[in-house]
Image (cartoon, rainbow, N blue to C red):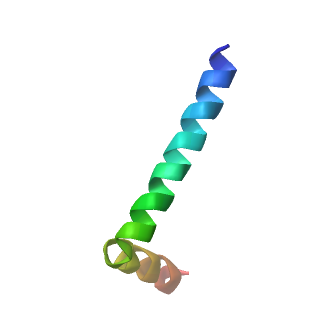
Amino acid sequence: MLNHFICSFLNFSLLYMTFIVAGNPAFFEPLFTRASLSN
């Protein structure tokens, strides 16, 4: 039961992050560029 709850929570947070990135890419762009530059 707890495992199922954690799985659904992770899926929801992934979906939520996807919607935020799709709706506001300018906010996440510096993070991605900084990560790629550090690599």
Q: Whole-percent x and y of residue 24?
A: 34, 71
Residue 11 x/y as whole percent:
60, 42
Residue 8, compared with residue 2, is above or below; it is below
Picture quarter with the C terminus = bottom right
31 over 17 or under it: above or below: below
Q: In the rendered image, which quarter contains the N terminus?
A: top right
Identify the residue shown where x is 46% and y is 77%: 32
Residue at position x 43%, y 67% from top? 21
Compared to residue 33, the image places residue 5 above or below, namely: above
Which x, y percent locates residue 14? Answer: 54, 50
Residue projecting furthest to the top = 1
Instruction: Kindly identify the residue that appears in the image at 50 percent across and 60 percent down.
Output: 18
Q: How many marks?
A: 0
Residue drawn at the location 38% of the way across and 72% of the way down = 28
* Depth check, front residue: 33 or 24: 24
Given residues 20 and 39, the one toward you in this image is 20
